[in-house]
Image (tube, grey):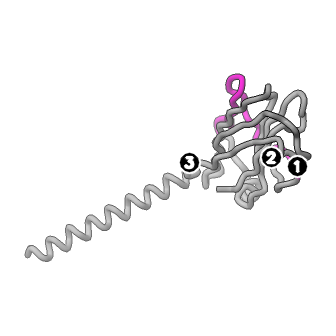
Amino acid sequence: MNKKLNAALVAAAMVAALAGCQTMDKMGAAMTGGGGEKVNLTGSNEVPPVQTAASATGTVSVGSDKMVKVDIKVSGMTPTAAHIHEGAAGANGPVLVPLVKKGDNEFVAAEGAKLTDAQYDAYKAGKTYVNVHSEAHKGGEIRAQLKGQ
């Protein structure tokens, strides 16, 4: 082969390899939920709002396969339960995913937690939220609306 043709083939192979890497990166992000949505739970987001010093931070991710991953760390309260609910901002709704208590102040999604198609649509539309309950606030003490990222 001549040198120009050889150089063109090498360049074409490099472009194809780089495109493949970008596709794999996008596929990996879709499968894992892209690293997840950072959440900050506060009493002022509850419905009705709750006066509390409690808060929580964490990550919620829902992959394109509808698998749910959650890791929430709570402070300033003794949590009794946590869930992902369906409901728009300013509204309460049913539990979609009960979260599992891990230690005294951490909640995670159970292994294999998955949304239905309708629940996934609500999540993508920003009509789901995560909240943490306490003995003093059985309906929820702190909450964060999910954006569906």
Residue type beneath disc 2: His
Find residue 52 and report its horizontal and vertical position in percent: 84, 35
- The image quadrant where one finds the C terminus is bottom right
Identify which residue is drawn at 61% across, 55% down.
64
Does the stretch in magenta take in 97?
yes
State the separation of the CA atoms marked 3 and 1. Answer: 27 Å
Across and down, in percent, residue 110 comes to: 68, 35
Q: Residues within 10 Å of mark 3 (few under 14, many from 20)?
A: some
Inter-mark Cα distance, 3 to 2: 21 Å
Residue for point 85% across, 38% down:
140
Residue under circle 1? 92
* Place of residue 101 in the rendered image (x, y in percent of width and height, measured from the top left): 72, 28
Q: Where 95 sits versus 127, above or below? A: above
Residue at image x 87%, y 49%?
Answer: 93
Q: Identify the residue at image location x=69%, y=30%.
A: 106
Q: Residues within 10 Å of mark 1 (few under 14, many from 20)?
A: some
Examine the image and state in which quarter residue 99 appears. top right
Question: Image quarter for residue 42?
Answer: top right
Q: Is residue 55 magenta?
A: no
Q: Which residue is mark 2?
A: 85
Can you identify the residue that label 3 sits on?
A: 35
Report if the CB atoms under discs 2 and 1 are less than 8 Å apart: yes
Taking the image as shown, residue 3 lies to the left or right of residue 101, namely left
Of labels 2 and 1, earlier in sequence is: 2
Q: Quadrant of the N terminus?
A: bottom left
Please state the horizontal and vertical placement of residue 92, each as a whole percent of the image.
88, 49
Looking at this view, is 54 or 11 the one in front?
54
Q: Which residues are magenta?
A: 91-112
